[in-house]
Amino acid sequence: MNSDLLQKVVKSQKYQILAEIKRSQGLSVAELCKRVNLSYMGVKQHCISLEKDGYLDTWRRPKGMGRPEKAYRLTPRAQDFFPNEFTNLTCRLLESVGEVYGPAAPEKILYQIYQSQTAKLKAKLTGTTLEEKTRSIAALREEEGYMAEYYFDTEARRHQVIEFHSPLLLLLDDYPIIKEMEERLFEAILDTRVIRNEERISGLYKCTFTLFPTE
């Protein structure tokens, strides 16, 4: 998608709907109405149009009581609307580096990138308590396009950063070492043990970083 078209789409009601679904595990029309402040019919028409264009699909979500409700979620095609820091060209460049300098070369480059990124984020981090620092890194990751949010798991009593997008999606499957590097990045910045857990359903993505501070 070209940049001019993307900028136009980002300001539209359809993009608002896509963005809200992106920050979830799927939403019904009624739930979307509350989030985007549009009428039921307005949201429904946009969802039907987005589904027809291949950006949304639906499934029947079980409810506690009564019939399952229809909910919308993103398809993989909808990723075009969200920032991708590493493009197909980057993937090809890393492949070429591996062919020329050996299979370990791409990982060495990625390691250097993450070392630099860790130092950059650590310099920007604010707060003194673990919660304040976790909120700060969530805000910094949000600025970088990860659609990140701070969350406190009241049942497990754990601080978490939940991300609903990754600009690295094109690289994650080819270079799974990135998942470990992200985990180490959080640990180095927050100075505590961190576990990374990733979920993907259709075009939805959710990555949870859970903190395990030493007692």
Image (tube, rainbow, N blue to C red):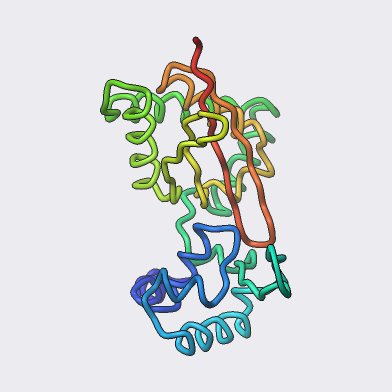
| Side (left or right) of 137 relative to 127 | right
Q: Nearer the viewer, residue 182 or 196?
A: 196
Residue situated in front as seen by the camera: 132 or 180: 132
For residue 211, say whether it is visible.
yes
x then y, percent, for residue 185: 48, 26
Image spot of residue 5 (x, y percent): 40, 76
Quadrant location of residue 124? top left
Which residue is at a point 39% across and 81% down the rendered structure image?
A: 38
Residue 110 seen by the camera: no
Residue 103: quarter of image: top right
Residue found at x 45% / y 40%:
151
User: In which quadrant of the rendered view does residue 210 lie?
Assistant: top right
Which residue sits at x=49%, y=69%? 18
Camera-side residue: 184 or 117? 184
Is residue 40 rendered to the left or right of residue 125? right
Question: Who's the residue at 59% across and 64% down the image?
Answer: 26
* Image position, residue 159 (x, y; %): 47, 31
Q: Against 51, is 109 above or below?
A: above
Measured as percent of width and height from the top left, residue 150 is found at 42, 40
Using the image, determine if residue 184 lies above or below residue 17: above
What residue occupies the far front of the structure in this picture?
65
